[in-house]
Image: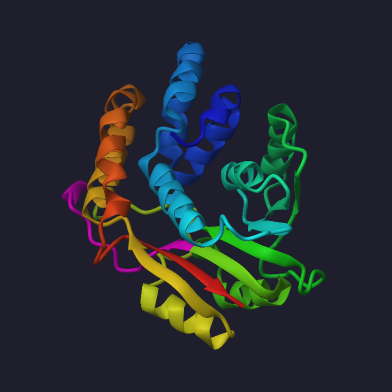
Amino acid sequence: MFGREYANHLDVLIESFGEISNRYQKKVKDNLKISFFKKIYIMLFGIPEIGFQIRSMYFKKILASNLLNKKLKKILDAGSGIGAYTFLLGKTFPKAMITGGDIDKYKLKSCQIMAKELGLKNIGFEYLNITKINNKKNHYDLVVNIDVLEHVDNYKIALENFFKVLDKNGYLYIHVPQSNQKRIFGSLKEWHHEDHMREGISKKELEISLNKFGFKIIESMETFGFFGKLSWELNHIMLSRSFVLAGITFPFLFVLAILDPLWKNNGGLGTAILVQK
């Protein structure tokens, strides 16, 4: 399961959960006395948030079907957050130089420490505002941007910047929530990510915007279909009630979540798309 390397960095996860909901952050802090058991749990199961796991499944799926046979030299994780995808890229492409960029200096410092602990010498982290990239034209073979555009006021500026920093024939992978999301459980109809500028971007709108800037669509799919949505909603219902309950139910919900990438989804909560310059 994805995210086992954070077992020794619970502070990073607490910060990450707090960005989803202040209630989640408080619940984690209230139980720090059992941090030893949390470390063991994360070593076994990874990060116990279904959305995080499902996003990684689709990312790995598109990497496997399109990019593993490419000789990528320079990769940018634009909006790297806690660095999970940067670390994955560093392991997947050991001959490439991976840069994780983010505006959160605390996360950047934590990621730098973790990269050293993991022995990933092909990884570096630096401050990056994706709406103000202007000094690295034609620089990267691949840019990765996972669940970041919904945090940006004008996401089209970011798309234009990604086009500029990519080398000729370079690739851009994006995952983003969709707008007008429909819930299964009534208790989550008013749920929202407290750090989002918008609910999301529709698949059609994103594809039109990418085409406008000159990108060619390689693969595009909806994510968080029925199985993903069901497992994600149950996971967040448990998280809102008790982290102990969430921990107990997570392995079972993970099995349900695995089914999501195996089906073609319609009306999914998110979009995963790979495009080429």
Q: Please say which color scheme the image uses.
A: rainbow
Q: Is residue 176 magenta?
A: yes
Q: Residue furthest right?
A: 135
Corner quadrant of residue 110: top right
Q: Is residue 189 magenta?
A: no
Q: Position of residue 178 (x, y in %)?
A: 37, 66
Residue 169, compared with residue 228, is above or below; it is below
Q: Position of residue 49 (x, y in %)?
A: 40, 38
Query: Nearest the camera: 57 or 110?
Result: 57
Who's the residue at 68% across and 30% down the image?
A: 118
Q: State the extent of the magenta-drawn residues as a range.
A: 175-187
Who's the residue at 51% across and 56% down the image?
A: 63
Whether residue 178 sits left or right of residue 213 in the image: it is left
Who's the residue at 80% across and 69% down the image?
A: 136
Q: Residue furthest front?
A: 69
User: Could you tell me which quadrant the C terminus lies in?
Assistant: bottom right
User: Could you tell me which quadrant the N terminus lies in?
Assistant: top left
Q: Position of residue 127 (x, y in %)?
A: 75, 53
Query: Nearest the camera: 67 or 242?
Result: 67
Who's the residue at 68% across and 59% down the image?
A: 72
Q: Position of residue 61 (x, y in %)?
A: 43, 53
- Magenta span main SS: loop
Residue 59, compared with residue 5, is above or below; it is below
Residue 112, compared with residue 230, is above or below; it is above
Numbered label tally: 0
